Image (spheres, rainbow, N blue to C red):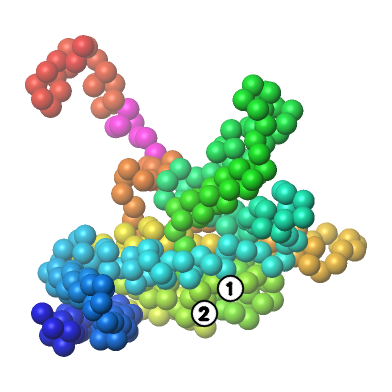
Amino acid sequence: MSVASLYRTCHREIRRFPDSYLREFFLLKLKDDCHTILHTKDNDGRRARRLKRLSKEAKRLHAANQRNVVAYDKLLSIAYGRMGKLKYELMEPLLSDPSAPPPPPLIPGLERSRPPVYSRELKALLTSGISHSTRPLLPEDIQRPKVLGGREDPKSEESRIYGPLSKRREVNLRKRFFVEEWKKVNAPLEVVAERPLQEKGTAQDVLDRAGIRGLGFQSLGLFAHIERMAGKRKVENEAGTTTTPTKQHSYWLRRRYQMLLGRIPILTGSVRMSKPGKAEDASKQDQSTISYFVNMADYAARPSKSRTPDQMPEMTADHLAWYDLAERPGTKSKSGKRAK
């Protein structure tokens, strides 16, 4: 199939999406992909591979319009930065902390041996079960990763038995651990500033007054758009006014965006009031008074296997009765076998 034919097929499928942001995103992506294919020389088969990739994309777009759950969730993950290049662009500001001094190099005189810097935002994402796709880290895991095996300390028992860990090996292990862990984190779209007895929001002027840096889609209202698509009746926009969607989407479509909200953590920067009469410089004072925590949207939905303990429903008397009945000897199970 030619590039022009694939372009028309994909363009036809993209225009059928009910999400305006999804249509704009994939139209831009389609133009970039076709432009890349047309300017690729077929010397080593790269043009054929890229044309085949675009053909698979056209099939995925058609399957998404036919209400295929896997295909539509894949498109949402690509467009909203849950995977792919956009995820790296959203996470890139969190991989450094301009306000923190650089750590000393592990190998004296070698600048490349400095350990990676964990920003305050990244620490909150790594230690939260909401934002981490697997098991979250403990605060001590960030300071002393378990991949080191305890041999980084020359006085430890592991170092005495197995020998001390070389500094070059420690540098590589720390960098590898840093990359592997941040890739398991779901990137937030924006950060919420919270001040006691004062304003709370995601607008850039609110963040500037709180001393919090913004993220990729800050002040664009993209998260509020996802909430509207998920079926939230009243959504507060950047200006602080509450809007009500005029049209309610189907249950299938709302469910897709509710599952998407389960993969988008809400990063909140809480500004605590500093004690009066304490003379400190402004930068040090900001670091000590701003703390970050992660929560989830009200309309978010997650699979039961990935729910954290704070998201599990409380056990009621009915649950206890069924549990006691199943534990009694001689009770038949669903398969017809008696419990031992």
Quarter containing the C terminus: top left
Asked if residue 136 shows in the view, the reply is yes
Q: Residues within 10 Å of mark 2 (few under 14, many from 20)?
A: many
User: On the image, which quarter does residue 205 sit in?
Assistant: bottom right
The amino acid pointed to by label 2 is Ser
| Relative to 308, 275 lies left or right | right
The residue that appears at 85% across and 67% down in the rendered structure is 281
The range drawn in magenta is 314-320
User: On the image, which quarter does residue 284 sit in?
Assistant: bottom right
Depth check, mark 1 against mark 2: the one in front is 1
Marks 1,2: beta carbons within 8 A: yes
Q: Of the numbered discs in the image, which one, if any, rests on residue 219?
A: 2
Residue 323 part of the magenta-drawn span: no
Residue 315 part of the magenta-drawn span: yes
Q: Which residue is mark 1?
A: 214
Q: Is residue 205 above or below residue 104?
A: below
The residue that appears at 32% across and 27% down in the rendered structure is 320
Where does residue 264 sit, x and y in percent of width and height?
Answer: 42, 62
Comparing 191 with 84, the one in front is: 84
User: On the image, which quarter does residue 244 sit in?
Assistant: bottom left
